[in-house]
Image: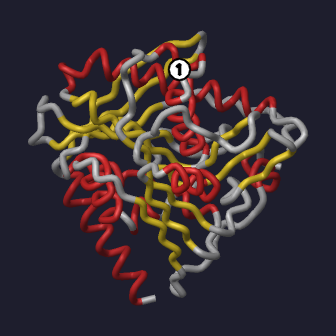
């Protein structure tokens, strides 16, 4: 309890110290039918329009709920901004709202929801590229990050861009993301285990080994499946791509949020060495902390019922 209390106190101090130095601006980046999609940009007040790396963040919520300014993410945003990284947290359309027929045998609604979110992420990326001079962003250092459904979206977006899939054609052909930081994410593939035509961006995976909401390994039916962090990292290792995987042994879907509070030094180190310095590193870490207890090990079906108020 003493260790946890100290962590909370330190987190509170860091958050308040950083928040006092961070400006937040809100912009509309696209309008799609009845949906006005906005983004919040968090920047160190001392940075102004200095060209800086950018972290493009997508919230979690099972493509049913969630919001870009959820307070669970604020410490992550403020500390990164304090370290000179501009954070852009975006709205995206929630494609599974009202869906009741999702199953391992019917993944079409999930595919539709992911594609909608990816399309919005690509539009937000184009907004950043267009306004990079006025808001001070180095377009060679745009890092994707997301939690849960947001993590699925950022991993899927990088997968689509690297493989030049049709959905990614709205981005400039030469543009590539500089890195990916995914908290409990996965890739939906209808072609078996995901493979990459060319080297993907350095990726930091966080995942609980007991996660039943977003698979840690994979769930598949023939060539169709959801391939989680462990499965993707195996491919990165085999192909000699740069990656860092943090395997939280015995923990569940709470890992989609907790590392944004407890593992910020690791995240900053990853950005510095893997992305800024472009060091070709591979790190595989299995962490078993007896002070951390599983908090969210329910199944995806139970989560959907809770989110739907059933």
Image-based side of 97 in relation to 87, left or right: right
What residue occupies the far front of the structure in this picture? Answer: 239
Residue 71 visible in this rendered orientation of the protein: no
Q: Position of residue 188 (x, y in %)?
A: 69, 39
Q: Which sits in the foreground, 27 or 221?
A: 221
Residue beneath disc 1: 168
> Is residue 281 among what the camera can see?
yes
Query: Total number of numbered labels?
Result: 1
Quadrant position of residue 2: bottom left
Q: Callout 1: 10 Å neighbours few (<14), some, many (20+)?
A: some
Specify how the rendered protein is coloured.
Answer: secondary structure
112 over 227 or under it: above or below: above
Nearer to the camera, 168 or 307: 168
Q: SS at mark 1?
A: helix
Does residue 231 appear left or right of residue 50 in this picture?
A: right
* Quarter of the figure with residue 212: bottom right
**Which residue, as the protein is rendered here, is positioned at the far left?**
46
- Taking the image as shown, residue 130 lies to the left or right of residue 286, namely left
Left or right position of 161 against 75: right
Where's residue 119, x and y in %? 56, 22
**Residue placed at 43% from the left, 25% from the top?**
38
In this rendered view, identify the residue nearer to me: 48 or 19: 48
**Residue in the image at 58% along x and 36% along y:** 156
190 in relation to 169, above or below: below
Residue under the point 16% across and 49% down: 21
**Picture coordinates of residue 186 (x, y %)?**
63, 47
On screen, residue 112 above or below 301: above
Q: Looking at the picture, how far across and down is residue 221, in whole percent?
A: 86, 45
């Amino acid at each position: 309890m003493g260790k946890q209390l100290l962590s909370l106190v330190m987190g509170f101090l860091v958050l308040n110290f950083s928040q006092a130095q961070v400006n937040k601006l809100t912009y509309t980046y696209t309008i799609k039918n009845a949906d006005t999609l906005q983004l919040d940009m968090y920047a160190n007040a001392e940075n102004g329009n200095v060209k800086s790396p950018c972290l493009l963040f997508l919230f979690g919520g099972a493509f049913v709920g969630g919001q870009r300014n959820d307070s669970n993410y604020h410490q992550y945003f403020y500390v990164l901004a304090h370290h000179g990284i501009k954070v852009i947290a975006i709205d995206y359309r929630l494609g599974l709202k009202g869906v009741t027929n999702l199953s391992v045998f019917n993944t079409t609604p999930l595919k539709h929801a992911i594609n909608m979110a990816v399309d919005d992420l690509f539009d937000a990326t184009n907004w950043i590229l267009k306004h990079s001079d006025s808001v001070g962003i180095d377009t060679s250092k745009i890092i994707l990050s997301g939690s849960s459904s947001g993590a699925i979206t950022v991993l899927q977006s990088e997968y689509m861009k690297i493989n030049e899939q049709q959905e990614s054609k709205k981005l400039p052909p030469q543009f590539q993301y500089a890195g990916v930081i995914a908290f409990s994410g996965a890739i939906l593939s209808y072609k078996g285990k995901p493979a990459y035509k060319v080297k993907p961006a350095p990726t930091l995976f966080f995942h609980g080994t007991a996660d039943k909401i977003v698979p840690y390994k994979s769930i598949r039916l023939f060539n169709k499946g959801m391939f989680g962090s462990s499965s993707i990292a195996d491919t990165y290792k085999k192909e000699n791509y740069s990656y860092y995987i943090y395997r939280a042994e015995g923990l569940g879907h709470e890992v989609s949020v907790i590392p944004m509070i407890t593992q910020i030094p690791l995240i900053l180190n990853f950005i510095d060495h893997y992305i800024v310095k472009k060091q070709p590193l591979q790190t595989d870490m299995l962490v078993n902390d007896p002070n951390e207890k599983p908090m969210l090990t329910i199944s995806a079906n139970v989560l959907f019922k809770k989110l739907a108020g059933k």
